[in-house]
């Protein structure tokens, strides 16, 4: 009997503790300037045994005021007074309403009543100062100063007035604001004002992220069950791009009964970014069990399976996402889908996906490269070149604008056009020319492709003297001459040869390139009737690749 009673009491105590923490979390969220989260938690815990209903109604009323719903606010403040007429908070609420209505004398009356019931409660007295500050910090400057001083007099070590002083400076003087928040945190011996740590971290994060994160770790060590502390630390890890730490902290936070579903969704996303794809997939699945049309989680499942290389599963998840009528599809969804379709060789479908991404986000000019690559895989070199040319043209326009802006603002960075894109585009034009080189080809298209290809390869060669670039230029010149080696091609080959010879390791690394050049030069000099020079290059080709048929050819050459 005694054992049963003890267990019963322990259970009751556990429920009471959880309820009190639930209400406390709501207050903490409000004081940390997160009213939506505060409202959810307070309403969820309003009827729990550990909830101070009068104070709860005050914060619900303040949330209503922020939404300009004065009627609802007054209703909450009156409910609070009915719940406990000795609780000073709701008189502050009524005074705030009076100030909003331009009735300063009525406000003063309510504030004095609040202060009388406060019985040296510095939190309530500070709320009066905050009401004046929110109404008009200039007009009511003396009232603000008076009530801040009264709060400090009521309790010399209360964090509340220092937090308000920090709030009043946060937008204009970060350093001093942070100083007030830090002082408040130092005074918070009863751990009733974690918002001091939170506001300090938010204010100082832009200056020193690591220091801000350390402050939140201090708070969490003091209040390990605080949903606000857990969530803020996770957020700051995320903001500081410490995604693995953010995911780990979110994993702890979502176990808190006062966490939010959207935070669990974010946890799934963080696990994805932390490359914990299987864990991310499992969390997304859990959410979808109770919310089967949650397209955020369908998206995460698709991304997870794609990252894991499980193509069939990724396709199934992608199709579920795209079939969801509630889905707010973005360009990244279509880009990921296009990449996946490319991987499974559904090129036409991939192109449709990429083009859909571009319609949603026309400023994401990299998508033209994805479309170009897809057309190249189809061997549609004309479309491949068109799209890559569009990308290059738009990049040139963007760079020109950045260069102009940089003249007046040196802090503006100027992007550089990737030389590989220019090189690839020149190769696309070569492919077009090759397709139209014969008698049945489009001569006008051939000439245009050659001209554009030559301009591009010359631009690349002026930047990068790599043997592959120079050899490609030689190939293009030979293509322009319908496959024949003329003086221009020979000169280009000799230039390439000089670059190759500058690095002895090329003789092994680029054997095929050497052989091709030697054979072309041998052919060129043979046609010029310079047999000695022709033999010299044929011999070099043979030394690189000793083919029996070449040996026979050289020996018969006269």
Image (spheres, rainbow, N blue to C red):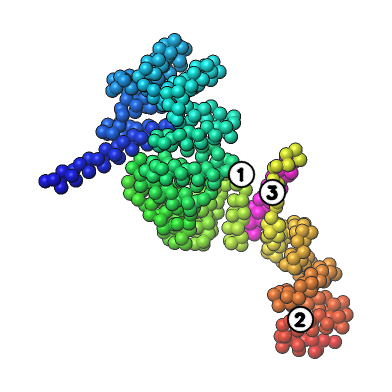
Quickly name the residue at label 2. Answer: 541
Q: Would you place residue 81 above or below residue 392 in this image?
A: above
Is residue 104 found left or right of 441 in the rendered image? left
Q: Position of residue 432 (x, y in %)?
A: 69, 61
Is residue 373 found left or right of 467 in the rendered image? left
Which numbered marker is on residue 29? none
* Residue at the image position 52 percent from the left and 32 percent from the top: 180
- Residue 334 visible in rendering: no
Residue 400 drawn in magenta:
yes
Mark 2–mark 3 Cα distance, whole angstroms, equals: 43 Å
Return the disc, 2 or 3, that comes first in the chain's sequence. 3
Q: Residue furthest left?
A: 1
Return the disc, 1 or 2, that comes first in the chain's sequence. 1
Q: Would you place residue 234 above or below residue 69 in this image?
A: below
Is residue 292 found left or right of 212 in the rendered image? left
Determine which quarter of the picture holds residue 526: bottom right
Q: Which residues are magenta?
A: 380-406
* Residue at the image position 15 percent from the left and 43 percent from the top: 5
Which numbered marker is on residue 363? 1
Q: Position of residue 223 (x, y in %)?
A: 39, 42
* Residue at the image position 20 percent from the left and 41 percent from the top: 9
Return the disc, 3 or 1, that comes first in the chain's sequence. 1
Mark 1–mark 2 Cα distance, whole angstroms, equals: 50 Å
Residue 108 drawn in magenta:
no
SS assignment at label 1: loop
* Residue at the image position 36 percent from the left and 35 percent from the top: 24
SS assignment at label 2: helix
């Amino acid at each position: 009997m005694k054992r049963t009673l003890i267990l019963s009491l322990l259970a009751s105590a556990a429920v009471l503790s959880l309820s009190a923490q639930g209400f406390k979390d709501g207050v903490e969220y409000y004081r940390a300037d997160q009213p939506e989260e505060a409202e959810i938690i307070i309403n969820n815990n309003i009827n729990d045994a550990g909830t101070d209903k009068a104070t709860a109604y005050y914060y619900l009323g303040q949330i209503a005021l922020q939404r300009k719903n004065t009627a609802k606010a007054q209703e909450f403040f009156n409910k609070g007074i009915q719940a406990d007429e000795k609780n000073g908070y709701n008189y502050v609420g009524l005074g705030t309403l009076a100030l909003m209505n331009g009735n300063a004398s009525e406000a003063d009356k309510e504030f004095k009543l609040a202060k009388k019931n406060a019985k040296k409660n510095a939190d309530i007295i500070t709320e009066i100062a905050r009401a004046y500050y929110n109404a008009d910090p200039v007009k009511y400057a003396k009232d603000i100063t008076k009530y801040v001083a009264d709060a400090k007099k009521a309790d010399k070590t209360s964090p509340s007035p220092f937090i308000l002083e920090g709030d009043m400076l946060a937008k204009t003087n970060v350093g001093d604001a942070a100083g007030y928040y830090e002082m408040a945190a130092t005074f918070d011996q009863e751990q009733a004002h974690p918002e001091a740590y939170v506001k300090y971290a938010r204010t100082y994060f832009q200056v020193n992220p690591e220091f801000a994160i350390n402050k939140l770790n201090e708070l969490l060590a003091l209040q390990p069950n605080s949903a606000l502390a857990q969530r803020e630390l996770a957020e700051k890890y995320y903001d500081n791009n410490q995604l693995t730490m953010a995911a780990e902290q979110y994993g702890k936070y979502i176990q808190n009964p006062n966490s939010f579903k959207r935070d669990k969704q974010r946890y799934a996303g963080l696990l994805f970014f932390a490359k914990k794809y299987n864990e991310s997939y499992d969390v997304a699945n859990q959410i979808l069990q109770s919310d089967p049309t949650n397209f955020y989680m369908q998206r995460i499942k698709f991304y997870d399976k794609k990252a894991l290389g499980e193509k069939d599963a990724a396709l199934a998840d992608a199709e579920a996402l795209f079939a969801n009528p509630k889905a707010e599809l973005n360009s990244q969804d279509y880009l990921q889908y296009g990449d996946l379709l490319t991987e499974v060789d559904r090129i036409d479908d991939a192109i449709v996906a990429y083009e859909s991404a571009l319609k949603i986000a026309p400023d994401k000019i990299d998508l033209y490269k994805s479309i170009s690559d897809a057309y190249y895989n189809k061997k549609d070199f004309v479309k491949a070149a068109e799209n890559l040319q569009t990308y290059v043209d738009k990049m040139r326009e963007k760079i020109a604008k950045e260069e102009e802006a940089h003249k007046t603002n040196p802090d503006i960075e100027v992007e550089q056009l990737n030389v590989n894109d220019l090189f690839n585009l020149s190769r696309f034009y070569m492919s077009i020319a090759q397709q139209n080189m014969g008698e049945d080809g489009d001569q006008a298209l051939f000439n245009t492709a050659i001209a554009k290809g030559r301009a591009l390869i010359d631009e690349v060669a002026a930047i990068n003297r790599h043997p592959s670039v120079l050899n490609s230029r030689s190939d293009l010149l030979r293509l322009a001459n319908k496959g024949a080696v003329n003086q221009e091609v020979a000169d280009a080959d000799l230039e390439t040869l000089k670059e190759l010879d500058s690095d002895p390791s090329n003789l092994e690394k680029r054997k095929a390139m050497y052989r091709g050049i030697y054979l072309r030069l041998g052919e060129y000099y043979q046609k010029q009737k310079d047999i000695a020079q022709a033999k010299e290059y044929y011999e070099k080709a043979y030394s690189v690749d000793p083919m029996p048929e070449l040996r026979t050819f050289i020996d018969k050459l006269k």
